[in-house]
Image: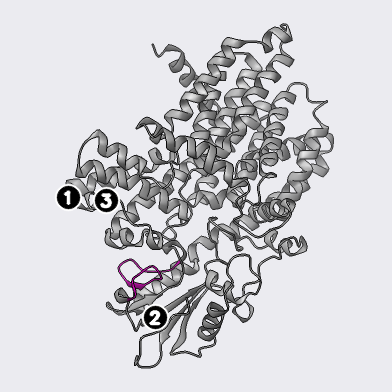
Amino acid sequence: MFGPGRALFDRVRSQVREDFRADPFLPYIMVAATLLASFWFFHRIPNFATRDEKDRLIDAMVPYGRVLADPSIESLQAGVQWSRVPFGATLYLFALALLPVVVVALVTGRGDIFTSVGYPSSAFGYYGLWASTPEWVWTWSLAFVRLFNVAFAIGSVYLTYRLGTAVVDRATGRLAATLLTLTFGFLTIAHEGGEDMPALFFVLLALNFLYVYIRTGERLPFYVGAACGGAAIAFKLTAAPVILGVGVAHLLRALQTDEDTLRTLLAPRLLVTGAAVGLVTILVGFPTFMVGGFDQIVTRFFGGSASRVSWPTGPDAPISWWFLRGYFSGMGLPLFFASVAGVVGSVAGLRKQRESGSGIALVLVMLVLYVGMFTQWHDFRVHHLLPTFPLLALLLANALSDLREWNPSVARPIVALLLVTTAIYAGMGTVGFASMPRDDAEAWLAANADENDTVEVYRVNIQDTAIPHGMNVNHRFQDRTAQDPCPEYIQLGYRDLLYLKNGTYYRNGERQQRYVRALVEEETDYEIVAEFGERPPEFVPQRATPGDYTDLLRYGVVPQTDQFADEQELRANQYTLVLQRSEPCRTPHESGF
């Protein structure tokens, strides 16, 4: 019954063992990937690295809580369908990460932690649930989530190596894996929980199996490649280009086979079976489908995803500006320009590469599909560009391999310079996780604030603040009667300071601007007592001007720069001011928000 699948598994296991035996450098690459991807992985815990990380974890907590409170199929259905939107296989992954924490809670008689979750209010980023749930639950569940993500990142590095080795040679695979390991945007996504890294892993797994199919014509790798592509889409719908990648792989196989090209191309059984395998994998990957939430699936596929194309989450600017902003920030200038040259070189070398040509063509097509998809969007972030990083690394490594064959004396210093500059950029960015402004601000408040002190914040989401777990908070979604009329502390962050910058696309308001200016100039009953991160000039954030390409150059030199929307916020975005009351409280404090 499991014959073909077991045989394929044995082949994969043997291939991995062979790679580590045959290549003495591979273990070092994997160790480097592990160290960089996991370095200070616990930053922001028990708070969240991104809003998506928070939402996905709570999406998994609710079904656990509903089933434990009322063990029934109906409770499971209601818990799964409660989700903000059905984010596919990510719910499975986060539920698995949360399982040990749930087991510990049950064994220690603390099952009420989860049975009391109910359907939490989303006010202030589910702050009520976050504050009422013991800190250790968030600490350990987020730690498991992050470590899962690190594992997918390490797997993605190996799969990049394997594809480069299979298509060209081991030297190319090594270089591609090393370049991906040193891509700061890749390492940034490795430091958060979500669907991006698992989706990338399955895209690369699909490409590896599809390349085996191109070389051998075996049907099983084709079906497994289709299933892996379906799994990638189940994690993240923007992995959809892999569908066309499956079709391109079939076309490339037909073009290089010794058999009749048309007969090979017209293989209805192969194509229908592959499509069915992919579709079933996608549907099974959505828990909402498994519990009968068909309307939510339709909305997710044809509503939310379609609207993202034109939905602005950043200022108006040419799409080329957004591409450069993302790539400069995610790769650094040397790696980006080298990657562009690598793409050009790989295209130019297609005619010469008879054996590896089909693999390079497959990678090129996937890159074109991803870039083409994002050109239709209003804006996007580094995490959207993540699937293109290993593709660019493979094409660059391939072009450098050709250069090495043509003139080794030129290739060696170019490779050395590229690796050194990229390692410096990625290393500086990764080391920065050990001292993030919000983490430092939380530690300061935990050490200096008294037990009953209150901190007032003005963000709309707890993820955007630096609040120690258990500290009293005034936030804008509270009823005024529930707020402390005389908070001891006020906290301002980078997003608050954007009110001081005229003409921003999102944060405008004269009243808020006057209030923030009065706070930073200490014209109120509060004075600045602590500051974390690099202060913007005159407290005014200096973001790149939308559409100005020269402003973007800094993003490719300084790794931790500001981001928009739901991207992980790095050092620039995490700038935090803490103000403390300097005068006795005689009248209730009036906020400008």
User: Mark 2 sits on what residue?
Assistant: 489
SS assignment at label 2:
strand
Q: Earlier in the sequence, mark 2 or mark 3?
A: 3
Q: Quadrant of the N terminus?
A: top left
Q: Residue at x 54, y 31 (%)?
A: 20
Indicate yes or no whether the magenta region holds residue 468.
yes
Q: CA distance from mark 2 to mark 1?
A: 37 Å
Q: Quadrant of residue 517?
A: bottom right
- The residue located at (60%, 23%) in the rendering is 210
Picture disc at residue 116: none
Residue 72 seen from this side: yes
Callout 1 amino acid:
Thr
Q: Is residue 467 left or right of residue 27?
A: left
- Residue named by callout 3: 118
Mark 1 Cα-neighbour bin, 10 Å: few <14, some 14–19, many ≥20: few
Q: Which residues are magenta?
A: 465-480
Look at mark 1 in the image and give the residue it sits on: 108
For label 2, the crowd category at 10 Å Cα-Cα, with few meaning under 14, some 14 to 19 and many 20 or more, is many
Relative vertical location of residue 2 with respect to residue 301 in this rendering, above or below:
above
Q: Earlier in the sequence, mark 2 or mark 1?
A: 1
Residue 585 location (% of width, % of height) = 34, 90
Q: Amino acid at mark 2?
A: Tyr
Q: Amino acid at mark 3?
A: Gly
Residue 192, position as x, y percentages in the image: 48, 51
In percent of width and height, residue 277 lies at 50, 21
- Considering depth in this image, is 333 or 173 the residue closer to the camera? 333
Q: Position of residue 293 (x, y in %)?
A: 39, 35
Residue 155 at least partly seen: no
